[in-house]
């Protein structure tokens, strides 16, 4: 459940700030908090305000998106569809110009 919640914060950032140059630093910051000793969903969630601010994002808007259960669920479903469509058997995976590497 914590991982899904953490994913939702990431998806909300991408949704609210569709420019990859904006959301990628936020995403990388969150993922860095979730790796290693003491990492995981709780660490990612706790880092949302810090990572949003560092990326120039409105943390309150990201929180509001996450709190909107209908929108958050729609974003989760969209991410699941993209993941399934990639037809991958491992993570992470990279797609460049439509080719899975």
Image: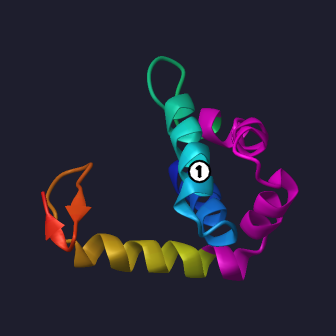
- Left or right of 96 on screen, residue 14: right
Furthest toward the right, the residue is 60
Q: Is residue 49 visible?
A: yes
Q: Is residue 85 above or below residue 54?
A: below
Q: Quadrant of residue 8?
A: bottom right
Furthest toward the top, the residue is 37
The residue at 79%/42% (across/down) is: 53
What secondary structure is marked by label 1? helix
Magenta: main secondary structure: helix
Q: Quadrant of the N terminus?
A: bottom right
Q: How is the image coloured?
A: rainbow
Give yes or no for residue 67 being in the magenta stretch.
yes
The residue at 61%/39% (across/down) is: 44
Residues packed near mark 1 inside 10 Å, few (<14), some (14 to 19) or many (20 plus): many
- Left or right of 70 on screen, residue 24: left
Q: Quadrant of the C terminus?
A: bottom left
Query: x%, y% of residue 90?
Result: 17, 52
What residue would you read off at disc 1? Answer: 6
Q: Is residue 71 above or below residue 31?
A: below
Residue stretch in magenta: 43-72
Q: Is residue 36 above or below residue 28?
A: above
Query: x%, y% of residue 5?
Result: 61, 56
Q: Quadrant of residue 94?
A: bottom left
Query: x%, y% of residue 75?
Result: 56, 76
The residue at 20%/74% (across/down) is: 98
Q: Is residue 73 above or below residue 96?
A: below
The residue at 51%/41% (across/down) is: 28
- Left or right of 84 on screen, residue 20: right
Give yes or no for residue 57 being in the magenta stretch.
yes
The mark tally for this picture is 1
Q: Is residue 87 visible?
A: no
């Amino acid at each position: 459940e914590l991982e899904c919640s953490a994913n939702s914060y990431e998806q909300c950032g991408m949704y609210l700030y569709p420019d990859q140059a904006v959301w990628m630093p936020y995403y990388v910051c969150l993922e860095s908090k979730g790796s290693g000793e003491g990492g995981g969903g709780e660490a990612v969630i706790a880092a949302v305000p810090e990572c949003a601010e560092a990326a120039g994002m409105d943390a309150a808007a990201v929180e509001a998106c996450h709190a909107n259960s209908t929108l958050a669920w729609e974003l989760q479903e969209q991410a699941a569809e993209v993941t399934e469509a990639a037809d991958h058997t491992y993570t992470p995976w990279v797609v460049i110009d439509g080719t899975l590497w």
